[in-house]
Image (tube, rainbow, N blue to C red):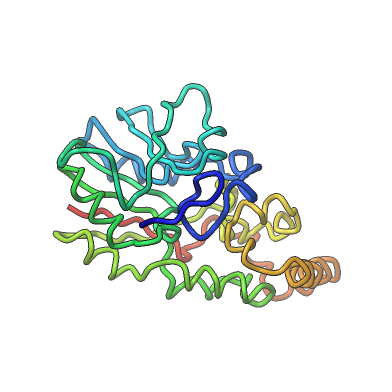
Amino acid sequence: MTQRMADGSAGDADYGTIGGSYASYRQPEPRIAALIEQALAGARTVVNVGAGAGSYESAAFEVTPVEPSASMRAQRPAHLPEAIDAVAEHLPFDDDTFDAAMTTFSVHQWSDVKAGLRELRRVARGPVVVLTCDPDLVRDFWLYEYAPLVLDTEARRYPPIRDITEALGGRADVTTVPIPADCVDGFNEAYYARPELLLDPAARQSCSAWSFVEPDLARQYTERLARDLADGTWDERHGHLRRQPHLNGSLVLIRAT
């Protein structure tokens, strides 16, 4: 049985504690949204599992959102449909209810990833679209030099891409998603060209992996980053990224049919 926290969060992160600023810092990035919409093309009805505050729910589809965290459901804009309180591993829908299913930045928080993915496959007649990160590539990001435990945590939590595709079955296409330099969805790699933004505690809190690091250690990590930004060390090593229009990092889009 899936364990749930006080606000209903069903994964390993307590969004009742860390999710207060999520909707402000985790806005849908239009160029990523366009790729998701393309992957769902042809569908009319879509279930969005782990829907959070509603990022990437396109008006092009009739979306049914599912979100266990009350604090995240409360942050959904008024124009979006109200989210159903349920967990990925036990979706309250009949087989083949929807044309397609989607989940973004969510699978790494499910208590039983394979069960959740099988549920997505069960309720969707057509494609299942998953936006996630490849754990084999997470540590390639420059932040690993400053906050190794944060990215170790991310790499541990994200399921291997092969496990996802095998659980979904059928044919799966895996595409690297370019991260634009001005990305408005504030996951860690979104700040690859704007390292100063990771000095903002609310920005870090909106990346759940930071919540697994003791506050004193997180402070040490950010103080070192602040020093290297102030004296030019970061720019000597990574300043070229400020001029790079996009990053091909760990972010991937999986479309399984």
Rendered location of residue 98, percent (x, y): 21, 36
Q: Is residue 40 above or below residue 81?
A: below
The residue shown at (57%, 45%) is 26
Q: Is residue 157 above or below residue 47?
A: below
Rendered location of residue 210, percent (x, y): 64, 63
The residue shown at (47%, 36%) is 54
How many numbered circles does the render carry?
0
The residue shown at (36%, 44%) is 49
The quarter holding residue 22 reads: top right
Q: Is residue 200 left or right of residue 254?
A: right
Camera-side residue of 138 and 109: 109
Q: Is residue 188 left or right of residue 127?
A: right
Q: Residue furthest top?
A: 79
Rendered location of residue 134, percent (x, y): 41, 68
Rendered location of residue 217, percent (x, y): 74, 72
Q: Quadrant of the N terminus?
A: bottom left
Q: Is residue 190 above or below residue 232?
A: above
